């Protein structure tokens, strides 16, 4: 019981938007599609919804192909990035619209709309117009209209991206319980935010340049990204990638940064690789092989992000806690050699070796 | 103190402007109750005191001595203007929706060119169009008929409707139509149930312009009709004889602008009501 897409392809004006996308989205599970802007995430949702024609490929729900059905016969609900509601209808009528279209009995419509409005916390707002409520509430109305249908397929295209930070956190927390009501639906959630994807998804699909780069459980994708591109997408800030090699003396990273080879890497063939290390696994240290100047620092929430440029290489650190580091401050950075990811040193950058998972994270 | 000064200034400006706008109406109103003596006896404004009011001017519009019967032209004008305006709005709205939502291409001709083609109809001076229209209506046997005039007016009003409505539909996010389709509406249902209700202000504005342009046309009503059909502007001009009957002209002028004033009043009311103006953010 699932939504299967096979070999979806779409080229417009010579630009490939989807290049042979194949994936399975099980019912009752939430799949997060993660990728940078223009990775093809929105296009994929629009194709599934029937709002975008494709050049080739198959769409199939529970074994029944539906690629030729028009959008209004597909039973797909969608929530956009922008808060899209019907401006001329009240909040209640907005949510009731799809049910009335299905000609459900009046009492049934009333019951379901009231139920879903209270689920999204808008029970008292039924009579208002969308223009008379806040952005966060407008997006809840859009969400309610999508949820009330209990559609076969529920698509969410970066629904939180236009909300302010606090509201985003709050709605994100509520999402899991909201979607638990959609136990028979395929739920697909687009995002650029790895934390969001990790937190709410049962399955993660990583998209890169119109193709699927990796599909898997959140922890699996996080612990073993198949390529440099996935490693960068699935970490925020993106994983530090340094060119280098393994030779007789150990590891050589960046411009002459020497590290001893841990046992896991000592057995690898001696040649060029690309090495990756998460920003959160770097730490300031007095005695460190990499020394550089802070070029940029940013505090968000309870974390500090530092951009450090050194003679032997440039890295980004993410530290727990708030640190004030004016640009130009010179610091040493400790690179834990046993936490290094090793990728092929070619265009694709396939994963060769990943460090052991940290205690179930 | 200052805010009161500014609001006084504002009201003064409004008063001066109102006087400026209303003066011709006042002039026409007093003149319509005058006789030949009253008109030539210098500027007078107060009835009974400065001049002796008479209903002669008004009577002459309804079959009175030396006048015309304005009732039939009035009805004809309403039929032609309203008929042409409504047809233009219906066709124009549908055309504009297509031009706003779908991409058309014929060689180098694209949507914007089609919109410009519509507007270009209004760039040509009417005299250039008069002869082709005349020949066309003659060929169709529709000269001197209301139907013929309605057809010509549609050609003139449709560009206005398309132009205004394209702009309006472009302001309604396409995602709203898409949402309606995902909610189970066919494209036509999406248009009628969601896009159209949100475009009501635009439709009203377009309808108002169509009614005004149609109602005020003299040129085509004059060149394309003769005796059987006569629209209001032509009938009013027919009042003119060797002596200009200022009293009947004034009365007929007031009667002929009355519907436009009413339309403008109601549309303005509707638009300024928050429900319509604030429909789209």
Image (spheres, coloured by chain):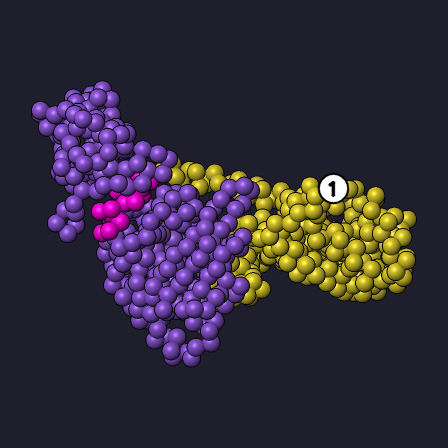
Chain colours: A purple, B yellow
Q: Hey, which quadrant is residue A117 in on the image?
A: bottom left
Please identify the quadrant where the N terminus of chain A is shown: bottom left
Q: Quadrant of residue A288?
A: top left
Output the chain of dot 1: B
Above or below for B241 versus A314? below
Residues packed near mark 1 inside 10 Å, few (<14), some (14 to 19) or many (20 plus): few
Residue at (36% x, 47% y) in the render: A213
Q: Residue B280: image x %, image y %?
A: 48, 53
Q: Is residue B192 among the parts visible in the rendering?
A: no
The quarter of the picture where residue A232 lies is top left
Q: Nearer the viewer, residue A26 or A115?
A: A26
In the picture, measured across the screen, residue B205 lies left or right of residue B274, that is: right
Please tell me whether residue A288 is drawn above or below residue B220 in the rendered image. above
- Secondary structure, mark 1, is helix
Magenta stretch: helix, strand or loop mostly: helix
Number of labels in the image equals 1
Magenta stretch in the rendered image: A219-236
The residue at 74%/46% (across/down) is: B121
Residue assigned mark 1: B123
Q: Is residue B119 above or below residue B196?
A: above
Q: Magenta stretch containing residue B139, yes or no?
A: no
A230 inside magenta stretch: yes
Please tell me which residue is depicted at 48% across the width and 60% down the height of the picture. A58
- Is residue B41 visible in this depiction of the protein? yes
Residue B172, how many percent across, how many down? 51, 53
């Amino acid at each position: 019981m699932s939504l299967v897409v096979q070999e979806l392809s779409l080229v417009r004006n010579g630009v490939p938007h989807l290049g042979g996308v194949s994936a399975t989205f099980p019912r009752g599970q939430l799949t997060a599609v993660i990728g940078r802007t223009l990775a093809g995430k929105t296009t994929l949702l629009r194709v599934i919804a029937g709002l975008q024609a494709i050049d080739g490929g198959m769409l199939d729900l529970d074994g029944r192909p539906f690629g030729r059905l028009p959008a209004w016969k597909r039973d797909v609900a969608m929530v956009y990035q922008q808060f899209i509601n019907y401006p001329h209808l009240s909040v209640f009528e907005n949510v009731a619209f799809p049910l009335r279209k299905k000609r459900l009995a009046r009492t049934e419509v009333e019951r379901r709309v009231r139920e879903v409005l209270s689920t999204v916390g808008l029970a008292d707002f039924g009579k208002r117009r969308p223009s008379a409520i806040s952005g966060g509430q407008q997006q809840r109305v859009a969400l309610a209209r999508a949820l009330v249908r209990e559609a076969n397929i529920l698509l969410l295209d970066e629904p939180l991206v236009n909300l302010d930070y606090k509201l985003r956190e709050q709605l994100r927390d509520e999402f899991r319980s909201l979607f638990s009501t959609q136990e028979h639906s395929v739920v697909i959630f687009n995002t650029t935010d790895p934390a969001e994807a990790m937190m709410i998804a049962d399955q993660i699909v990583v998209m890169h340049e119109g193709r699927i780069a990796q599909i898997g459980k959140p922890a699996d994708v996080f612990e073993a990204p198949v390529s440099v591109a996935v490693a960068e997408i699935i970490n925020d800030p993106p994983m530090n990638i340094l060119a280098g090699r393994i030779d007789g003396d150990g590891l050589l990273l960046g411009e002459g940064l020497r590290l001893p080879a841990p046992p896991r890497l000592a057995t690898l063939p001696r040649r060029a690789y690309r090495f990756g290390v998460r920003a959160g696994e770097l730490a300031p240290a007095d005695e460190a092989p990499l020394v550089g100047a802070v070029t940029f620092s940013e505090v968000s929430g309870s974390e500090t992000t530092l951009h450090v440029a050194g003679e032997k290489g440039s890295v980004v650190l993410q530290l727990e806690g708030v640190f004030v580091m004016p640009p130009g401050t010179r610091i040493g950075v400790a690179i834990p050699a046993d936490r290094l990811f090793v990728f092929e040193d070619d265009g694709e950058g396939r994963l060769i070796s990943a460090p052991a998972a940290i205690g179930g994270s | 103190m200052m805010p009161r000064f500014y609001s006084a200034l504002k009201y003064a400006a409004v008063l001066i402007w109102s006087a400026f706008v209303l003066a011709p109406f006042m002039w026409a109103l007093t003149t319509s109750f005058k006789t030949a003596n009253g008109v030539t006896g210098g500027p007078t404004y107060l009835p009974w005191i400065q001049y002796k009011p008479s209903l002669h001017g008004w009577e002459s519009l309804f079959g009175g001595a030396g006048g015309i019967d304005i009732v039939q032209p009035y009805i004809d004008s309403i039929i032609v203007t309203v008929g042409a305006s409504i047809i233009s709005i219906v066709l124009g709205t549908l055309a504009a929706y297509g031009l706003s939502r779908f991409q058309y291409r014929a060689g180098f001709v694209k949507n914007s060119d089609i919109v410009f083609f519509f507007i270009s109809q209004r760039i040509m001076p009417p005299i250039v169009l008069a002869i082709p229209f005349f020949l066309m209506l003659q060929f169709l046997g529709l000269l001197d008929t209301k139907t013929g005039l309605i057809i010509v007016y549609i050609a003139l009003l449709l560009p206005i409707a398309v132009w205004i409505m394209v702009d309006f539909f472009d302001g309604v996010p396409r995602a709203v139509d898409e949402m309606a389709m995902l909610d189970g509406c066919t494209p036509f249902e999406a248009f009628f149930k969601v896009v159209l209700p949100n475009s009501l202000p635009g439709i009203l504005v377009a309808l108002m312009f169509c009614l005004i342009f149609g109602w005020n046309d003299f040129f085509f009503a004059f060149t394309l009709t003769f005796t059987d059909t006569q629209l209001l502007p032509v009938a009013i001009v027919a009042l003119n004889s060797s002596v200009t009957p200022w009293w009947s002209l004034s009365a007929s002028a007031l009667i002929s602008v009355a519907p436009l004033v009413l339309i403008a009043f109601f549309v303005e009311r509707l638009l300024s009501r928050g429900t319509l103006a604030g429909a789209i953010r």
